[in-house]
Amino acid sequence: MNDTVILQAKSLQKSYQLSTGESVEILKGIDLEIQKGEFVAIMGQSGSGKSTLLYCISGMDQVSGGSVMYNGKEIQTLSDDEISQVRLLSMGFVFQHSYMLKDFTIKENIMLPALKAGKVSKEQAAQNARIRMERVGISHIADSDITQVSGGQLQRAAICRALINQPAVLFADEPTGALNSRSTAEIMEIFNQVNAAGTTIIMVTHDVKVAARADKVIYLEDGQLRQEYRLGKWNDAETLQSREANLFAWLQQNGF
Ligand SMILES: Nc1ncnc2c1ncn2[C@@H]1O[C@H](COP(=O)(O)OP(=O)(O)O)[C@@H](O)[C@H]1O
Ligand SMILES: [Mg+2]
C-alpha cells in the first residue's frame, strides 16, 4: 500500500448471524482502494450493502473476513480503544439525521468531539466551532436550541461537528436523504469545498445529482462491487448537468 492510499479493503466480507442461527452474507468480498484527497460516492439499490460497507471501512462495525487498512494500519488488529481513538481524531461522520444532543446548543454540540479528544482547551474548541460555523453560514444559530433550527441548518451543524477535529476522512451516509433540493445543493457545495481543502470524502447516496459531485462513483450490487465510474474532480468550468447526464447513463447500463 503506497502512501497516497488512505483506505484499502481486500476481500472484505460481512455476515450477520440471524436469530435462527442462519448466517447471511451481506458483503461478499469487496476490493476497494481510496486515495488521499479523493471524493468517492457509493451507490447501489436499497439493501445492496452500502451502509454496511461504510460501517466496515470506518471501523464502526467488525468485518467477518478480509481486511481493511486505514492509513497503513490494519484496523482489525487494533483494540476497541485504539479504533475509537482513530475514529475520534481522524474520521468525521455525517448521517441522514444529525443526531444532535437536545440538552446542548448548536455550538456546544459541535464542540463535543473536540472536548472528548482533549487536544485543545475549551476556549480553543469554541473558537474552532465558530470558524466552522462561519464557513457554512450558521454563525447566527450558535446559541440556538436544536429544536429551533431547520433541517438544512442542523445538517450543516452536523458537518461542523464532523470536521471539528480536522479529520483526514469524512464519511457520510445519505447526508442529503432528508433534505429538500435547495438544502441538498447547499450541503453539496460544502462537501466540494471541504474536499477541495484536502479532506477525503466517502459518501453513500442514491441521488444522481449528489453523486455527480464526486470524483468517482462505485456501484454495489448485492454485496459486490460491480463497477466504478470515474468522473474526475469537478471544476467550475464543467456543468453539473453534463456530469449528471453522463453518470445517469452509466448507472442505467448497470440496472439502476
Ligand atoms: N444487523 C443486521 N442484521 C441482519 N441483517 C442486516 C443487519 N444490518 C443490515 N442487514 C441487512 O443487510 C443488507 C444490506 O443493508 P444495508 O447495508 O443497510 O444496505 P443499504 O445501505 O445499501 O440500503 C440488507 O438486506 C439488510 O437487511
Ligand atoms: Mg443504507
Image (cartoon, rainbow, N blue to C red):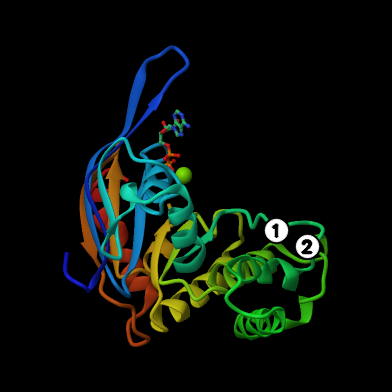
Disc 2 element:
helix
Image point (82%, 58%), residue name: 103
At label 2, counting other C-alpha atoms closer than 10 Å, the crowd grade (few under 14, some 14-19, many 20 or more) is many
What residue do we see at 29% from left, 45% from top? 220
Q: CA distance from mark 1 to mark 2?
A: 7 Å
- Kind of residue indicated by mark 1: Met
Disc number for residue 100: 1
Q: Callout 2, which amino acid?
A: Ile
Residues 121 and 135: in front is: 121
On-image quarter of the N terminus? bottom left
Q: Position of residue 203 (x, y in %)?
A: 42, 60
- Which residue is painted at 36% across and 79% down in the image? 239
- Residue 79, position as x, y percentages in the image: 41, 49
Q: Residue at label 2? A: 146
Seen from the viewer's position, the closer of residues 188 and 163 is 163
Residue that lies at the very extreme toward the left in this rendered image: 2
Q: Quadrant of residue 161?
A: bottom right
Residue with the most extreme top position: 20
Q: Quadrant of residue 107?
A: bottom right
Marks 1 and 2 in Cβ contact (< 8 Å): yes
The percent position of residue 55, horizontal first and vertical second, equals 43, 48
The number of discs equals: 2
As drawn, 184 above or below 236: above
At mark 1, the secondary structure is loop
252 relative position to 130: left or right: left
Q: Residues within 10 Å of mark 1 (few under 14, many from 20)?
A: many
* 187 to 134, vertically: above or below: above
Q: Position of residue 10 (x, y in %)?
A: 20, 48
Residue sitting at x 62%, y 54% = 97
Answer with mark 1 or mark 2, whichever residue precedes in sequence: 1
